[in-house]
Image (spheres, grey):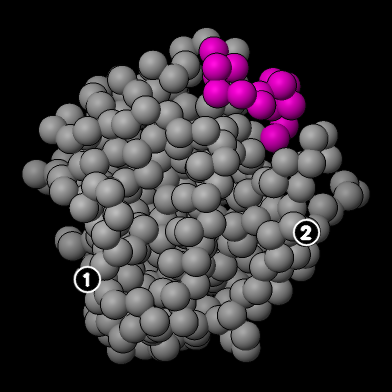
Amino acid sequence: EAHEEVFGQFSPRRLSTYTIGEVRTELYRRFFTYSGGLVSPWHDIPLFAGADGADGALTMWMVTEIPKSTRLKQGILVNEMMNPIAQKIENGAAQEYKDQIMWNYGFLPQTWEDPAETHPELDFKGGNCPLDAIEIGAQQHLRGDITRVKVVGAFLVIDRGELDWKIVVVDVRDPLASKLKLVPQLSFWGASTVSELRKWFKQHEAPQGRVGDLADAQRALDVVEKAHEAWRRLRNGEAKTKWAWVGETAGKQAQQTRSSGQVEYTGKPRSRLVPQHHAVDSLSGGKNLDDLERDMRRPPNRGHRPVETDEDLRATRLIASRAAGGNFGN
């Protein structure tokens, strides 16, 4: 049996996903489980993953929403219970990029861009979502994959009046990851150069907005740490927002030590919301989270799979009540 690598009390091998609803429709959802119990990919997957053995650099976890060489636009719903990945819909049709994207697109868990906080220089506020992450390595990730990454840099994007940081990262398993210490070395990845990234953000993420220059890794780490602190305020009920489902973990809030990556993994979220929000009632038809989990729970497995049983059809009907008005994480 393969060795199970554990980071603090978090083991990525115990995490899996399953889907309900048809792909490319507004009913599609990808849920996450840990040891068979439903979890939120935003709140329950830790951010920090310890130091990289090769060079001692701080590493983090990334969740993939849009795999490299695909086109469908999907993202987590920040205001829906358990924060599943869903299909983005526009005018009744699935949104997709014109061309296949050249990198893995996702987010950093346990981060949040606070919509009530104004940038001290630019006078723009955050977009009420976790930090976007763009992984520039050679391998394609699967949708829902969790990957250990190193931070390379960050782009500041202004889109629709909101401040939106794009954190550039690389999979620690990528052969060139250990060589990437300076921003100019992004050219090692061929098409994933600074200019290509900036051009792509301008074309696809902020066609009417602005894209700044690439900030270095230290600046990007500062952005991530600040977003992590904002997330902690959100989880503690100290932030002012009505548009985020944050649940409540059993016992203490997850505690992390930046230097070691140790985490206290506290298990599945409970149904009380901080702050209170209507998502539970409208999603679950009055059921509490334990009842909803009983409808959707599946035995743990090592991969990502569709679910097509009578119980899943019931879960799909529950999801349908929230399908029309999701608030996406990117």
Residue at horizontal 41%, vertical 74%? Answer: 234
Badge 2 element = loop
Range of residues picked out in magenta: 172-187
- Within the magenta stretch, is there residue 176? yes
Instruction: Where is residue 282? Give x, y as percent.
Output: 24, 79
Q: Work out whether residue 106 can be spotted.
A: no
- Residue 241 lies left or right of residue 262; in this view the side is left
Residue placed most toward the observer, 217 or 20: 217
Q: Which numbered circle lies on residue 39?
A: none
Viewer-proximal residue, 281 or 277?
277
* Residue under pointer 1: 321
Instruction: Tell me the element at label 1.
Output: loop
Q: Which mark is residue 260?
A: 2
Look at label 2 and name its amino acid: Ser
* Front tag of 2 and 1: 2
Q: Does 7 sit above or below residue 39?
A: above
| Amino acid under disc 1 | Ser
Residue drawn where x is 23% and y is 24% of the image: 203
- Tell me if 235 is positioned left or right of 212 in this view: right
Instruction: Give the total number of marks visible in the rendering.
Output: 2
Residue 165, percent from left and from top: 37, 44
